Amino acid sequence: MREIKDFTKNKKINFKKLEKFGFKLKDNSYYYHTFLLKNQFKMSVKINLDSSIFSEVIDTETDEPYILHLLEEKRSGFSEKVYKAYSEVLEKIKIECFEDNIFKANYTKEIIEYAKNKYGDELEFLWEKLPNNAVLRRKSTNKWYIVILTISKKKLGIDDDEIIEVINLHNTAEEVERSIDYKKYFLAYHMNKKYWYTICLDGTVELEEIYKKIDISYELAK
């Protein structure tokens, strides 16, 4: 089997979904088998507990490994069809069995789950060159109410090069002005500093307090 590089970058396995998809656990690895192009090829996928993934395509007539679909410069009409069928299986596995794991801070994960459970909203990654930044927007108005960013503390005026995850939230001008203390609440990074502020997702502000601020930001996104 050949390892598929970068397949699980910024992704994490949902093991329950693997089993639901049809993977079987054996010797600490998950295995899945399917057939391509009307049983002309058998495709096998192996996923280890560290999220590394391997695949193999076997020609059912010769019982030999088929690799032409992996050689981009040699793919032609038929091998292109094999590659398309092979890629569709992998993409389905990625969609149904893996979840985004871009943000690492526990606070960030809790906030994403909070917004998902309360408002039914999912992260949107709008900037191709900034894959570690995302927004959540209110469906009824399409307006942002959460912006999650990965930045250096120095961007907030803190004398520290540490890279952290932060949240930008909306509030009234009066409340923003009252809240800014450069310890828990900072002038909004890269947003309107009159109506938005930034909180570091490092435990400086308790989650329950952030949840209340999220609810206010959501209401203001009407």
Image (tube, rainbow, N blue to C red):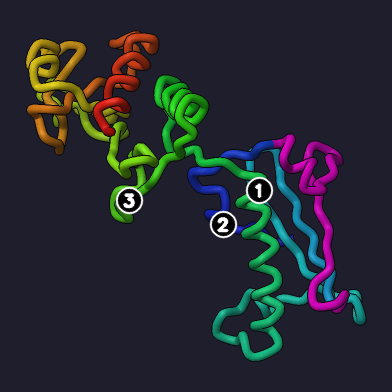
Read off the residue under disc 2. Answer: 5
Read off the residue under disc 3. Answer: 126
Label 3: few (<14), some (14–19) or many (≥20) C-alpha neighbours in 10 Å? few
**Residue 18 horizontal/vertical position (percent):** 74, 43
- Mark 3 vs 1, N-terminal side: 1
Residue at the (31%, 42%) spot, across then down? 141
Q: How many marks?
A: 3
Up-down: is 108 above or below 71? above
Q: Which-is-in-front pick, marks 2 and 3?
A: 3
Magenta segment, which residues?
A: 15-40
Mark 1 residue type: Glu
Q: CA distance from mark 2 to mark 3?
A: 24 Å
Magenta-drawn stretch contains 33: yes
Q: CA distance from mark 2 to mark 1?
A: 19 Å
**Which quarter of the rendering shows the C terminus?**
top left
Residue at the (32%, 44%) spot, across then down? 142
Q: Are marks 2 and 1 in contact (CB under 8 Å)?
A: no
Q: Is residue 189 left or right of residue 19?
A: left
Q: Residue furthest bottom?
A: 77
Up-down: is 216 above or below 64? above
Mark 3 residue type: Leu
Read off the residue under disc 1. Answer: 96
Q: CA distance from mark 3 to mark 1?
A: 22 Å
**Which quarter of the rendering shows the N terminus?**
bottom right
- Mark 2 vs 3, N-terminal side: 2
* Helix, strand or loop at mark 1: helix
Up-down: is 185 above or below 11? above
Q: Is residue 191 left or right of residue 71?
A: left
**Residue 124 horizontal/vertical position (percent):** 39, 45
**Residue 149 horizontal/vertical position (percent):** 29, 35
